[in-house]
Image: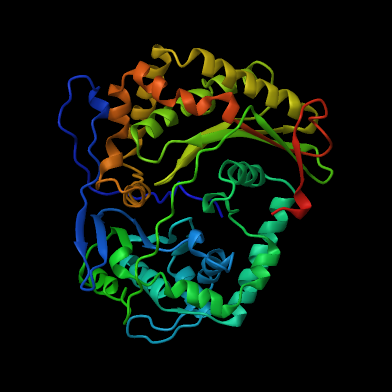
Amino acid sequence: MKRALPILLLVACRTEPAPPVEDVPEALLYAGPVLRHARTSVGMPMAFCAAEDSDVGAVALLLPRGTSHDGETPGAAVMAAAMLKRSGVSRMSSTGPVDGETLANTLEALGIELAVDAEAEHLLLRATGPSSQTARMVGTLCALGFHPWWTEQVMDAAMGELADAAEERSRGSPWLVEEVLREELFKGHVLGRPAIPSLDSLAAVQLVDVARWHAGALNPQHSLLILSGREGDDVRRAAETCRVADAAPPSVSVSAPIPRTSKGPLHIHVELPETETSYIRIGSRAPVGGSAEANALGLVMEAMANGFSSRLVQRLRTERGLVYGVEGGVVGGRHAGMWSVSSSTARSNAREVSDIMEKELDLLFAEGLPAPTWKKFARANALAFAYGREAATELLSVELDNFVLGLPPNGAWTTPQKLWRMDPQWAWRAVRPFFDPKQRVVVIAAHGDVMEDRPHQTRVAATWP
């Protein structure tokens, strides 16, 4: 279950243009969707985007408790998320209890898809489906979030799903190298915990532990409901079901991780079972999400690793044919972030691909990103955002990020404009320290020793996490 960000629920809603700005091309002007903010009778904040003409509705419910609040029961949050995907509800509007199988069959018949993810500081429930079923989606998420029907059978099924996922990652995958990288960058901090805890930790989680963990999340005043679809009295009534008799106190916030100390690039080799595919991920810490520095670093990642004209794609694919593609990005939280570039290749090419990636990152650290390149990618980024907004706005993704990062409503919608106006020299000075090779971590998951001539740490995937 992937962290974070990004949450992508594509919906269409009414929009409005931003005020004219002289130095921004007209196609880039966009202030974000028109949102109506309100609170339910128990004080839960809501953000609503009317989409009367859209065939698709989307709803998200964020509860203020995540993996960082596991306490002495590692895996409770992840287990709760897995159980909610197949759980029934003890109270759903006026219908009374509904078992998990009946609820799943009903949602499937209505064309509604459900997703649940445990993040560091919150639990996120999402539903997408026909716009005409917006009220049903709101009622379902509120019932699952506040009145789940926990059973031993549901827990057994969830454990089976998590065990399969853990086994898949141990055999080697992009998620495996990502988690090794994150664990190293945030060692000793809750942000470094794996998305799927060890099987021993999960096996130790009892039903009472999940119920106790979930009880701490039942605080409507610190939750958030975001929806896009058909507005009506039935939708508002459904939102009112997000209530409990005694709200729990707000969860304790995660503290910022201490700075890392490193004297040079750290190389980690994850030994995989015999396979011809290898996975490489290189990264370091990043600024807090939503900051100008994080936005600037994200654009540098676009220039380095995303798209056919990016530097690493040119070096690795166009010029040498070593990989099919390269991905790069920034994951930002309220207290810390992480940037990374990654790819996969044949085992025999793993070392060469890794060396080229490091060489290009060294070159970037030494020379920076030229101003013309910055403007080129700033314009491409903003135009792609502008052209795609009408048919598929990332409403829930952006507004959830605003809430989690403590940004004002619609705050992130103007990021493309800010990047266009940003001084490239200031931007590079702000992000250059995050590319210091001394802070870099390189993870290669491959069969056989691909780093025999370089100091490195070796980990055996079969015993990790």
Taking 127 as reference, is 27 left or right? Answer: left
Left or right for 40, reference 437: left
Residue 105 visible at all: no
Outermost residue, bottom direction? 96
Residue 345 as seen in the image, left or right of residue 81: right
Question: Total of numbered circles in the picture?
Answer: 0
Q: Where does residue 415 sit, x and y in percent of width and height?
A: 31, 34
Residue 39 locus on image (x, y percent): 21, 65
User: Depth check: 375 or 441 in front?
Assistant: 441
Occupied quadrant, residue 232: bottom left
Q: Please name the residue shown 32% across and 39% down the image.
A: 389
Give the residue at x 37% y 63%: 61
Residue at the extreme left: 19
One can see residue 215 in this view: yes
Q: Viewed as shown, does residue 370 lie left or right of 158? A: left
Render colour scheme: rainbow
Question: Is residue 367 positioned above or below 189 on the image?
Answer: above
Q: Nearer the viewer, residue 402 or 453?
A: 453
Give x and y (percent) for residue 215. 43, 75
Vertical placement of 255 versus 448: above or below?
Answer: below
Q: State the image quarter where residue 261 is shown.
A: top right
Q: Quadrant of the N terminus?
A: bottom right
Tell me the quadrant of the picture where the C terminus can be found. bottom right
Image location (x, y in percent) of residue 455: 76, 30
Instruction: Give the residue drawn at x 30%, y 53%.
Output: 54
Q: Residue at x 53, y 14 (%)?
A: 366
Viewer-proximal residue, 332 or 237?
A: 332
